[in-house]
Image (tube, grey):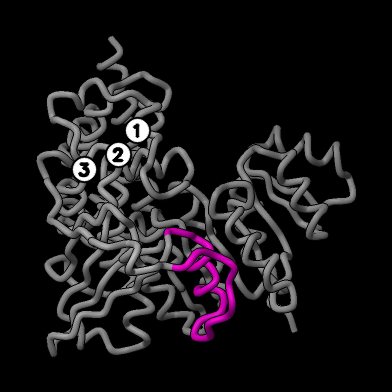
Amino acid sequence: MRKKICLLGATGSIGDSTLGVIDQHGDLFELHSIAAHKNWEKALKIAEKYQVQKVCMFNEQAADKLHQAASHLTVSHGMDGLVELCGDSEVSVVVNGLVGAVGCLPTLEAVRHSKIIALANKETMVMAGPVIRQALQKYPQAKIVPVDSEHNAIYQCLADRPISEVEQMILTASGGPFRTLPLEEFANISVAQALKHPTWTMGQKITIDSASMMNKGLEVIEAHFLFGVDYEQIAVVVHPQSIIHSLVQFRDGSLMAQMGVPDMKIPIQTALTWPDRLPLETGRVNLAEVANLELFAPDFERFPCLRLAYEAGKKGGTAPAILNAANEVLVAAFLNEEIAFNHIPQGIEYCLDKLDDSVEQLSLEVALEADKSSRNWASEFVQRIRN
């Protein structure tokens, strides 16, 4: 019997890669339902190709246009639509490829309905990691398998070994396009420059996050909550070739690494089929051709977003939610050419300075309220810069 998949973020880069896996293993997977932001034309093409009956467009106007173009489809919109798809009794696997904080509630709903969640939305764990962990304890049939290449690599290296055997987890980072750019030139970085990632093809927001290394900072926080390890046990190394996707240092001195070409179909298929390994049409690493694999420590002066993420993670409470929300607003402002690239970490620090330290226990409601407040503060910061 084929696994029925609900694909959130179907029109984005994670969606494209997931569909590529489904194409290669149509005997194992059936696309049951999809969700997208506002690209209703692409959503319609996907629905027609895979005979999908249920589609959620987060944008209401896009949902209306899709319904007019394809009245035979069951079309929903907004957060209610996303949540409804994740709770569908026919779905066994939810692939969450949504971008940003919008992915949090759907993940929680999927956990509550004991789904397998192939999680590419790192903001879920950053915003509400403690809430998700509590839900997983309450619904033990639910399971989160990370899709981010780094966390998926760690997942493979662990191979269900107990966390007590782990000494350190090492996340690799490409260093992005500005790894060697002189610091005095950071104020003049253009949007076009920041969108030229040297090794990965991704959506705009995550590409900017990679350029600032906020992507790696969010992944540090995500690793803390996904695997239950202290921040002191999570290291980051810059690895420009993006061949080693992450490593695990065990307490006996063994160091395990997962390697492969930079293709998101690999971690997605691993998440969908683990512990089985099925054939996949993708590139192969030729170590003789790769020659030298470089690994070196990150420069926190060059990448202050990584430092801020570590600080927010260690502070806990609502700090990670504030960090994430501020970053989303500031990245959008940079993409709209309203602020400079180096204003992103400055704006995040501005928002974190407003943090209320009185939160003792994080709830989803508290995290969402912090998210809302941080977005307002970040918007204030953008207006100050523009004026």
**Residue plotted at (59% across, 77% down):** 279
* Separation (CA) of disc 1 from disc 2: 7 Å
Element class at badge 3: helix
Which residue appears farthest toward the top when viewing the image?
A: 387
40 in the magenta segment: no
Rendering quarter of residue 51: bottom right
Question: x and y percent of residue 175 in the render?
Answer: 25, 47
In primary-sequence order, the first of circles 2 and 3 is: 2
Q: Is mark 1 in CB contact (under 8 Å) with mark 2?
A: yes
Q: Which quadrant is the C terminus positioned in?
A: top left
Query: Between marks 2 and 3, how big is the CA–CA gap?
Result: 15 Å
Q: Residue at x 73, y 52 (%)?
A: 55
- Residue beneath the point at 72% across and 48% down: 76
In the image, is 263 to the left or to the right of 365?
A: right
Q: Amino acid at mark 2?
A: Pro
- What is the distance, in whole Å, between disc 1 and disc 3 at their CAs? 15 Å
Side (left or right) of 147 relative to 287: right
Q: Which residues are magenta?
A: 262-284
SS state under label 2 = helix
Q: Residue at x 18, y 59 (%)?
A: 295
Residue 89 in which image quadrant? bottom right
Give the residue pinned by disc 1: 194
Taking the magenta stretch, the answer to whether it contains residue 267 is yes
Residue 177 is tagged as: 2
In the picture provided, is 74 more to the left or to the right than 110?
A: right
Please tell me whether mark 2 or mark 3 is closer to you in this view: 2
Label located before the other in sequence (1 or 2): 2
| Disc marking residue 305 | 3
**Identity of the amino acid at label 3?**
Cys
Which circle, 1 or 2, is nearer the viewer? Answer: 2
- Amino acid type, mark 1: Ala
